[in-house]
Image (spheres, helix red, strand yellow):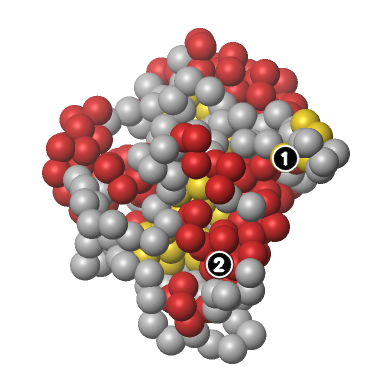
Amino acid sequence: PSVTPGAAGRVVAVWGPKGSPGRSTIAIELAWQMCACERRTVLVDGDPYGGDIVQLLGVVEELPGVVWAATAAGRGAVDPGTLADLARAGRRGPALLPGLARADLWADVPDHGWRAALQALRHSFDAVVVDTGFCLEPPDAGLGGTPRGRNEMTRIALEVSERVIALCRCDPVGVKSFLWAYEALAEVVDPERIVVVANRCPADGRAEVAGLVRRHTGRKVAVFVPERPRDADRARRSGRAVSEVAPGSDLVAAAADVAALVGAPVPARGVLARLAGRT
């Protein structure tokens, strides 16, 4: 796709604490929903502990990933036109920047290069969706007294994002992990940029989760994503997004609501439709 000189898209990070809150699944579905209305959308696997996006999407060919992008951007050797040619996930899916093939490769992603790569992606696409890691612990000083740490990939992605989707898994352990980790998130990100999304949430547990989140963080739960294991399993087995294999799923409708909240011009459905008084 062509790139408009000087144009800049939005960066949306998907974060959640330890305990499998569903970061990759929500990032994939969010990217698909944004891509439906903003064709120039890219999905970035930015998990410094090793990414699963390519496996979840059934991508088997070798594609340039975050190590290449950060290294090249750090040298000033990448431009928006180069990044705009990234391969797409499926015929109608977003462009894809794969993550680390092995967890130990995080050290090959220079901090300044990673920041530069995200900025270059911003100028290559209308929307950049980044699947991040869970840990926000700041780095220790390295051998030369320079801060260096695995979690800087996540911290930098959060810092440069216009919106951060903060996932809370709706069970006692998931809620506890979210509440404990939220304080660290709020130290990295202005809370006004945080959109709290409750994932895998049964209908009869929404009020309790919403109350706990509001009481302990001061934030409202913006969207409740239902647990639909059958749809998610079908997507994983086929190496595609739920948006592709089960477009009528209410999990997809919830992802569309999240996309609308971060600025994508998608039709109001689900929660947003009800708030607007629609049927």
Residue 72: give its label: 2
Indicate left or right for 161 with 101 as reference.
right
Number of residues whose C-alpha sits closer than 10 Å to that of mark 1, classed few (under 14), some (14–19) or many (20 or more): some
The residue located at (32%, 67%) in the rendering is 87
Number of residues whose C-alpha sits closer than 10 Å to that of mark 2, classed few (under 14), some (14–19) or many (20 or more): some
Query: Which is more toward the observer, 141 or 184?
Result: 141
The residue located at (51%, 12%) in the rendering is 173
SS at mark 1 in the image: strand
**Quadrant, the N terminus:** bottom left
Indicate left or right for 128 with 203 as reference.
right
The span from disc 1 to disc 2 (Cα, nearest Å) is 19 Å
Q: Which residue is mark 1?
A: 148
Q: Earlier in the sequence, mark 1 or mark 2?
A: 2
Determine whether 159 is above or below 218 in the image: below
The residue located at (59%, 14%) in the rendering is 176
Q: Amino acid at mark 2?
A: Ala
- Which of the 4 quarters of the picture holds residue 222? top right
SS at mark 2 in the image: helix
Residue 61 visible (yes or no): yes
Q: Are marks 1 and 2 in contact (CB under 8 Å)?
A: no
Q: Amino acid at mark 1?
A: Arg
Q: Position of residue 273 (x, y in %)?
A: 43, 52
